[in-house]
Image (spheres, rainbow, N blue to C red):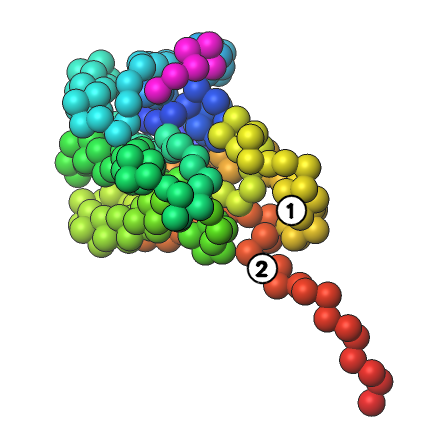
Amino acid sequence: MFDLTGKRAVVTGASSGIGQAIAVALATAGADVASIYLDNPAGAEMTRRAIEAAGRAALIVQGDTGAAGDMEAFGARVRADWGGLDIWVNNAARMLVRDFAAMTVTEWHETLQTNLTGYFHGCREAVQSIPAGRPGRIINISSATDVQPISGMTAYISAKGGVIALTKSLALELGPRRITVNAVAPGATETPLNREVYTEAVRRVYAEKIAVGRIARPEDIAGAVIYLASAEASYVTGHELLVDGGLVLNGNTGFAETGAS
């Protein structure tokens, strides 16, 4: 089960964190993996080496997922080199924690450019790259914050909510083409993207709220992507899979125990 031997996959933003873990997991499952990354060339090189160490081909290029021209060039390169794709994972993201009243128009647009418009570009390239008549997979990395919002993250959460709408709409539209479209929603996860915002106080809160008692590792998220990319998930589409360790389940407020009757 979950064998991806011979499949061709894209993971955007695979130079670190969740994207890197997904890329390596796909390669370990048997897929060749391509990626476009914005910065961190050293991390991108680590990803390339890990993919090749798994015995698979790697195609890693630098570019901006929020820029239409960069994504069009990347998609064309993948199609030219590999003849098409089977799996596309939209993962590249940027973090913004800012009080709404203090947020600038530029910050709003830049956050949506990467976290929503970049996914639009990715989905468009995926549709062009998956050969007609062959089953395909589009997997969008969303966030548990679209289910359980956090104050100060209006732009980020708005973008992730848009990703879910995009996922569901495309699942309906692309179903007849045998392309499934799903989302994976990570909860709190140890990544470079979150390093600055995960203070010790934040970590203590998560330790209390997450049912399994710990913040996720990127590899915890990658397993869900492998499932949705596999033939075993061929009848799953338009779904957001929460991978949050039970974070959003926790409504505990410390109620006092009721007296015995």
User: Mark 1: which amino acid?
Assistant: Tyr
Q: Is residue 183 left or right of residue 177?
A: right
Quarter of the C terminus within the rendering: bottom right
Q: Residue at x 77, y 73 (%)?
A: 256
Q: In this view, does 37 lie to the left or right of 260?
A: left
Residue 75 position, x and y percent, is: 21, 23
Task: Please say whether residue 43 is one of the residues in the magenta stretch.
Answer: yes
Q: Which residue is drawn at 55% across and 47% down?
A: 244
Residue 122 position, x and y percent, is: 25, 33
Q: Which numbered circle lies on residue 249?
A: 2
User: 225 above or below 68?
Assistant: below
Residue 149 position, x and y percent, is: 47, 54
User: 23 above or below 150?
Assistant: above
Q: Which residue is drawn at 18% across and 51% down?
A: 173
Report how far apart the C-alphas of labels 2 and 1 lie in the structure. 13 Å
Q: What element carries label 2?
A: helix
Circles 2 and 1 in contact, beta carbons < 8 Å: no
Label 2 or label 1, whichever lies nearer to me, is 1
User: Mark 2: which amino acid?
Assistant: Leu
User: 187 above or below 198?
Assistant: below
Task: Please say whether residue 202 is one of the residues in the magenta stretch.
Answer: no
Q: Name the residue under label 1.
A: 206
Badge 1 density bin: few <14, some 14–19, many ≥20, Cα 10 Å: some
Q: Which of the pair 67/225 is nearer the observer?
A: 67
Residue 138 seen from this side: no
Mark 2 or mark 1: whose residue is earlier in sequence: 1
Q: Which of the pair 74/29 is nearer the observer?
A: 74
Badge 2 density bin: few <14, some 14–19, many ≥20, Cα 10 Å: few
Magenta residue span = 38-44
